[in-house]
Image (cartoon, grey):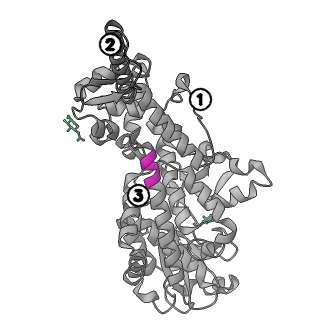
Amino acid sequence: MKVEAGSFSISLPSTPLPARSSRVTCVVAAGLAFLLGVAVGVTLPIVLVHSPLSSSFQVAFARQEAARDTGSFIQPMKEVGARSLIAPEHTWSPYIASKLGIGNDNSSIPSLRASNDANAASPNALRSEWKRIPSEIDAPDVEEAAVLLVEGVYWGDSVEEKLPPGFSESEVDEWRKFTRQHAVVRLEEGCGRMQNRLVIFENGTKSCCRYRQNYDQIQGEIFSFYLSRLLGLTNVPPSALGVVKAADWQWSNVGSQLALAQWTEERPVVLTRFIEGLVPAFIPASLREAKRRLHPVNVEGQDPRDMIELAQWSDLVIFDYLTANLDRVVNNLYNMQWNPKMMEAPAHNLARHQKTGLLVFLDNESGLLHGYRLLDKYETFHASLLKAVCVFRRSTAERVRQLVLRRDVGDRLRKMFRRYEPDLQDYLPPIPDKSIKILNERLQNVHKQIAKCEKWYRNS
Ligand SMILES: *[C@@H]1O[C@H](CO)[C@@H](O)[C@H](O)[C@H]1NC(C)=O
Ligand SMILES: *[C@@H]1O[C@H](CO)[C@@H](O)[C@H](O)[C@H]1NC(C)=O
Ligand SMILES: CC(=O)N[C@H]1CO[C@H](CO)[C@@H](O)[C@@H]1O
């Protein structure tokens, strides 16, 4: 027996020919069964695909995937099952915001809809569709969340506008000129390690002066500073190189103090502008725990003013990962193995400018050379911090992307050294090829992390 419906045809097993009336019943029953099957088989997926349930499921799924990657489940999905396709609380807001067009980017409308729905819903239709979910729409944090992050992972204007400008390019230029044109009148102890000194210039301006027997740390500090500028980060105080010559007009006032400090002649030093008005800075709570995460879910619904420090931390984590700087957070992570309270102490080599809220990244000397030599021991910690972060400043992400595409970070750093320090070329070797190679790999890792986060959260 053969039943035809539309273009489909189904062959049923042949049976002895029954009476005419029961043959009709059979045909009708089979036809109904077929249509029912088609109806269920076709409409159910459509309904599911278009329902907020499935969208929320996707959001939850992306987040779950994200959580798995960082080895933590801050907001685990409820068990999988028809009942439980429920996104964790708060994961809704930016998604809904993008649906409502509150966010300032239209590209965040889910690609699912764009690709599966030929008659893509108009913004108004979306609007009314989403108005049907009263509890989320009424949530007071929708608007804030919408401007807090854009495209899922980037700090929005409401945060960017409040960030302190940091040290401008002209301040950096002025500092370079200043350190070359003014005599030093006094050296005082201070500025971290034993051999460093606080240098006081003739008009009272102070500078931290880093002196090392070893070139590595001088290179590490100045090239870290250049890298910060390449990334558009303005948190590292202006730094310039100098050469200590006791007979030179610049240092002749402090000959005896140079001898006391046991500084050798003709060594390159780093002169960093001394910043007044600094207070301790602390590691943010979301990065302190073992399951550390700075993901969209950790910032949603917060006051943009409270995000000023977190946004700078998102830069700090990238910067310290690139340079493999140990002294700031990684050392605390390492020591946490013995002392769980480690993370609550003020962060080393980090301070907050009380007046502006700028986080000042200090003492980068372990970066790029020394830090790279210790990667075997510490890379797990560096990587775990990087992987914890899934919100970024767009400008920083863009700089990273460009450096990865052009693979020219080495050229750029060396050019900066030649341009800014023409008199130092015979005193300090440029950054070694080996460091450049590692730096390029680390730039790629950062780029991958950003791309991964975009994939997870862009449509959420
Ligand atoms: C988003 O779409 C609206 C209406 O379609 C348009 O007026 C607005 O300029 C778009 N915004 C962006 C950032 O593209
Ligand atoms: C010292 O001189 C520089 C450059 O002329 C100036 O910018 C700075 O404010 C002066 N510092 C003090 C403490 O007077
Ligand atoms: C030049 C500079 O950044 N100096 C700082 C280095 O770090 C110590 C703390 O470890 C600070 O006291 C210095 O001011």
Question: Which residue is at a point 56% across and 79% down the rendered structure image?
Answer: 218
Q: Is residue 216 magenta?
A: no
Callout 1 environment at 10 Å: few (<14), some (14 to 19), or many (20+)?
few
Q: Report the front residue among 201 and 109.
A: 109
Instruction: Please say whether residue 237 is visible from this viewpoint.
Output: no
Question: Which residue is at a point 55% across and 25% down the rendered structure image?
Answer: 84
Contact? badges 1 and 3 (CB < 8 Å): no
Taking the view exactly as shown, the residue that stands out farthest to the right is: 338
Q: Mark 2 points at which residue?
A: 28
Taking the view exactly as shown, the residue that stands out farthest to the front is: 16
Disc on the earlier residue, 3 or 2:
2
Q: Name the residue under label 3.
A: 396
Question: Which residue is at a point 31% across and 37% down the rendered structure image?
Answer: 109
Callout 3 environment at 10 Å: few (<14), some (14 to 19), or many (20+)?
some
Contact? badges 2 and 1 (CB < 8 Å): no
The part of the chain drawn in magenta is 451-456
Quadrant hosting residue 9: top left
Q: Name the residue under label 1.
A: 78
Element assignment for label 1 = loop
- Residue 227 tag number: none
Answer yes or no: disc 3 within 8 Å of ligand 1: no
Ligand 2's quadrant is: bottom left
Which amino acid, mark 1?
Lys
Q: Distance between the residues labelled 3 and 2?
A: 67 Å
